[in-house]
Image: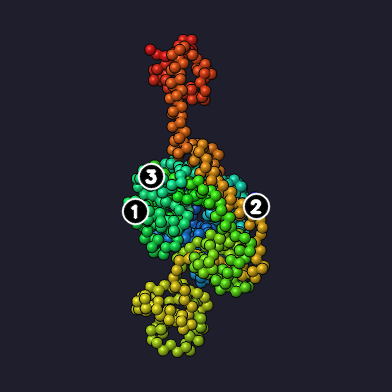
Amino acid sequence: MQHLRWFFRIFAAMTKQNQISSDKLRSTLEEFWGYKEFRPGQEQIIHSIMSGRDTLALMPTGGGKSLTYQVPTLAQDGLCIIITPLIALMKDQVDRLKKLGISAAAVHSGMSFTQIDIALDNCVYGDVRFLYVAPERLATEAFRLRVQRMKVTLLAVDEAHCISQWGYDFRPSYLRIAEIRKLIPDVPVLALTASATELVAEDIMKHLEFSEKNIIRSSFARPNLSYAVRHTDDKNEQLMRVINNVQGSGIVYLRSREGCEQLAEMLREQGVSASYYHAGLPHAERNMRQEEWTSGRTRIMVATNAFGMGIDKADVRVVVHYTMSDSLESYYQEAGRAGRDGKRSYAVLLVASDDKSKITKRFEQEFPSLDTIKSVYEKVCNFVQMAVGDGLYASVIFNIHEFCRREKLYIGTVKAVMELLEQNNYMTLTDEMENPARVMFCVSRDDLYKIRVDRNDLDHIIRTILRLYNGIFTEFRAIDEQQIAAISGYTVERVKELLKRMWQMRIIRYIPSNTSPILFFNEERLPTNDLYIAPETYHHRKRLMEERFENMLTYSMQQTECRSVVIQRYFGDKEATPCGVCDVCLENRRRQKSDSSNIQTTILHLLANEPMSARELCHEIKAEPKLIASVVEQLQQDGKISASIGGKLIINE
Ligand code: ADP
Ligand code: MG
């Protein structure tokens, strides 16, 4: 049955593909994006998908994965569903598509039930071409019922490695994708990821129920990026050296927020134009700082790994890691922000002699015990006021920083707990998002009329809200204070003040706009003692964390193999060739040069005594025969020696 279906899919695609030529794909690319050419790998992936084959595409971050599902969708009719875990990226993609005049929608945990319903209905009845769905929403009835009525032509799975239990980023909700496939059986799947070991790649194809194995791998080489590692116990001095030696914009990555502030200060004191960025800054402030850096008004950004998403700057000349990343994946991605324009750029990692022990110790401290997991679970549920037995599929705003402050918990530990809770399918913590203000009435409509609102302004604002937002009696609705102000004729400040007043009078519940992640309950809240964390996931996670860091350490400690080769092998490319521009390659070349010049002297010395054959020279000189041969060749080319009739080498007079 499976095979028959597959055959039909390919057959149908074959007839269809004849109509959608490479020209059509290219004109779609140019029409919507204004790009003339596909990037390496993109076209191959698109052809594979258009011929109806399930496809796993491995491509580095920034390589252009989005276009591989967007172009084929636009080149034909119908809708593309994309599963992706990050709300911020989802919003970013939807905004971009809308700017291009393409209708797109998203369904994620930051939305109310009504908003989700509207979005899904638009996909059934409207002209939506792209629907982005957060994996945890796949289980919901609202989604399952609608998806079968949509005209889906492609299912794209972004960050596909999340489906593998072998991987560090495992998300159980990804396993639900196979169930969705059954609902739309004739739709091919395109799995996209920037990080998959062989084991993970196999797992992706298995769990997504590929009809046959099909991997398309792009190169992870960055020929214009020169990697280097500097071992030093005076990182500031090294950093200054790097920054003074390289022209143009740069990023300095650092673990701690305070560290960022201090280092930026230090740079400014040294006369370098620098600013800092971390998730502790208010959203508007972050945007402003990023914009100043992007436009070139600030030269160096000192930042935590919160700085990254949506960086659209091609001429970053240097990325320095003042502290090590947790994994080579992160390192590659962060370092890779340098040199997007293809010009020579540098990725420098600074390592101090005690870094290894310091970071290992921190891992130990941060990794939660089973008791800690239970206690944090309880505290989190209390913090968001979720009662035992409640909460299935609920999503609530969860200000993790506020929580840590109040409970005096270390954020690294809390994040590790949340990840383990997610892997055991209890709850999902999304990335941070800008949340609009929300309002819900805590009195019924009838009661509302009974309450004597003897202030005209309150009465007016209530009427305005009721006119603008329906469903506000049954659930929290996102409101727009600006809009309310515009309609009511009040200033935004006045509106906010009145909302607060109503909140104090217990007429409404009011959550002002904020930036924080959302907590989604995959399960109702359990009595804390019933919480079960599978020992496998617990130990496995710890081991994976150690392994990942081990790889990062190896990269930084080894001095003999090309850095780019080490990285590419990590990403599964066993045939990578040395880059020629990293510190190891440069050192090798320098050494080879000095070796060559030594050999040259020796050869000339030996031949001055008596003519010798190449073989005899190799016998006399302790060096690689290949290297000796190349020096001999060079000497001949330079006319310093030549071969006599007997085959012996002689010095030219
Ligand atoms: P990924 O998902 O692989 O990290 P994206 O899909 O977000 O990468 O693409 C990264 C950037 O590359 C985007 O700004 C995108 O517009 C750009 N891009 C993608 N394909 C092309 C192309 N063929 N020509 C020029 N720019 C492209
Ligand atoms: Mg992407």
Query: Where does residue 591 sit, x and y in percent of width and height?
Result: 46, 31
Work out whether mark 3 precedes mark 2 in sequence or the reverse, and give the earlier one.
Answer: 2
Real-space Cα separation, disc 3 to disc 2, in angstroms:
61 Å
Q: What residue type is labelled 1?
A: Glu
In the rendered structure, are the residues bearing label 3 and label 2 in contact, judged by CB atoms less than 8 Å apart? no
Real-space Cα separation, disc 2 to disc 1, in angstroms:
67 Å
Residue sitting at x 52%, y 18%: 620
Taking 18 as reference, is 383 above or below it?
below
User: Which circle, 2 or 1, is nearer the viewer?
Assistant: 1
Using the image as rendered, state which of residue 422 and residue 546 is in the foreground. 546
Using the image as rendered, state which of residue 16 and residue 228 is in the foreground. 228
In the rendered structure, are the residues bearing label 2 and label 1 in contact, judged by CB atoms less than 8 Å apart? no
Q: Which amino acid does label 3 sit on?
A: Arg
Residue occupied by mark 3: 241
**Tag 1 secondary structure:** helix
Label 2, ligand 2: CB separation under 8 Å: no
Taking 457 as reference, is 168 above or below it?
above
Instruction: Count numbered badges in the picture.
Output: 3
Mark sitting on residue 2: 2
